[in-house]
Image (spheres, rainbow, N blue to C red):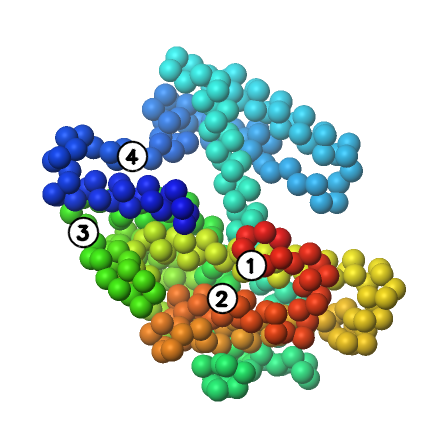
Amino acid sequence: MRNDYGKLIYLLQDSCLQEISPLLQFDLIAPIKTVYSLLKEYKAEKLLEEELLWDATKEITPEGKSRAEIQYEIKKKERAIEELSSKYARAGLNKEQVCRCLYSIGDNHSFLRVSRDPVERMLEYLRKYYQADEFEEGHSLAISTGVDGARLTHSHNRQYSFVEQSLTLWKEISHEMFKLWMLSEEDLLEKGNRYDLKDTGQGLHRVQHSPKVSKEMQRILYKTQVQLGHWVGSSVIHLGDTNVPNALMFIDKYTQVSRILNPIVSTLNKIDRLMVNPSLKIYINNAFEGEDNLKKTILTDFFRHAFDGSGADNFFDAGSCIDGRLTSAWNWCSMIEKKPYFPIFLLTDFTGFDGKF
């Protein structure tokens, strides 16, 4: 994203400029070939309705399974791939291309597990340990402007709703990420959609309107608002301004949600293992009053201060707007080493919020 892909997109973006395109005398950009477009071209789209499709594309994870169970699932998947690729191979569409379609669908399942599932897990934690209308002593989600860096003032009930809607929106964005990514490339590479090179306060960036991504984000936001029945805070979506200069920066911003949440979910999942060690059990009981209270301590701090409007100098850059919520979450990540429970993160193999967990 931040190396070869970003450079490639910017190179292609420049090839669309009116002063550059005539000099090239050919078009560098071609439509993205999707699974559906390839299958439709050869009248093989019925593949997507096959019952065996799930077996051929599902991700095989080792958690809670014996070696024999894993091997059985692998063999079952291989048989399904072989059967489908043989059935739908035809003139112009060989078995290898059908297999590539199946692997591509499988890649999407893997992506959703890594990017969407941790958001769902955090929503489960929120609903398991907290209630909107009441709270345990010491675990209120209420925040006040100026206290512990917060820039918003919310009661427990209001903050609960604010966190719930933010996580729900992130889940919907993660679920639609491939669609948003394709629309982003269309916005970035559309002829006539010029960019302005500006200093955004975070360096020199290409500021460009992104109408297709903006429209889809408005749809996702509306869907989330209808699903929850209410909305707390601002509904402003920054796109094509100094906060999110262009669609590439938008994609980069929201692919980081999993980088934030996966290490937290991983640490919470591994606390049970720490309790098996007698010495660590004594430490957790003495320092955090037990395993359950430790989990709630971490979650309470995250739900308070990863959604408190902090991370920027003004409400236009952070606050309660759609993108500002992610800014606040990154601000919380930057202070993890100062948290009293940071040793627990280290004991559960935490290395940083860089996608490795």
Q: Amino acid at mark 4?
A: Pro
Compute the Cα span from label 3 to label 1.
34 Å
Q: Are marks 4 and 1 in contact (CB under 8 Å)?
A: no
Q: Amino acid at mark 1?
A: Phe
Badge 4 element? loop
Q: Earlier in the sequence, mark 2 or mark 1?
A: 2
The residue shown at (19%, 50%) is 193
Which of the marked residues, 3 or 2, is nearer the chain's N terminus?
3
Residue 191, disc: none
Residue with the mark numbered 2: 330
The x, y position of residue 257, in whole percent, is 50, 58
- Which of labels 4 and 3 is toward the front? 3
**Residue 49 appears at what percent x and percent y?**
48, 31
Q: Nearer the viewer, residue 20 or 174?
A: 20
Q: Residues within 10 Å of mark 1 (few under 14, many from 20)?
A: many
Decide: is 60 above or below 342: above
Q: Nearer the viewer, mark 2 or mark 4?
A: 2
Dot 3 corresponds to which residue?
194
What amino acid is labelled 3 in the image? Arg
How packed mark 2 is, by other alpha carbons closer than 10 Å (few <14, some 14-19, many 20 or more), is many
Q: Which residue is mark 4?
A: 31
Looking at marks 4 and 3 on the same chain, the residue that comes earlier in the sequence is marked by 4
Q: Compared with residue 241, is residue 192 higher up or lower down, i.e. above or below?
A: above
What SS does tag 3 mark? Answer: loop
> Mark 2 near mark 1, Cβ–Cβ under 8 Å?
yes
> In which quadrant of the rendered view does residue 132 lie?
bottom right
Residue 56 at what x, y percent from top left?
57, 30
Q: Is residue 233 visible?
A: no
Left or right of 274 on screen, residue 255:
left
Q: Position of residue 304 (x, y in %)?
A: 55, 76
Q: Where 332 falls versus 121 (above or below)?
A: below
Q: Which residue is mark 1?
A: 353
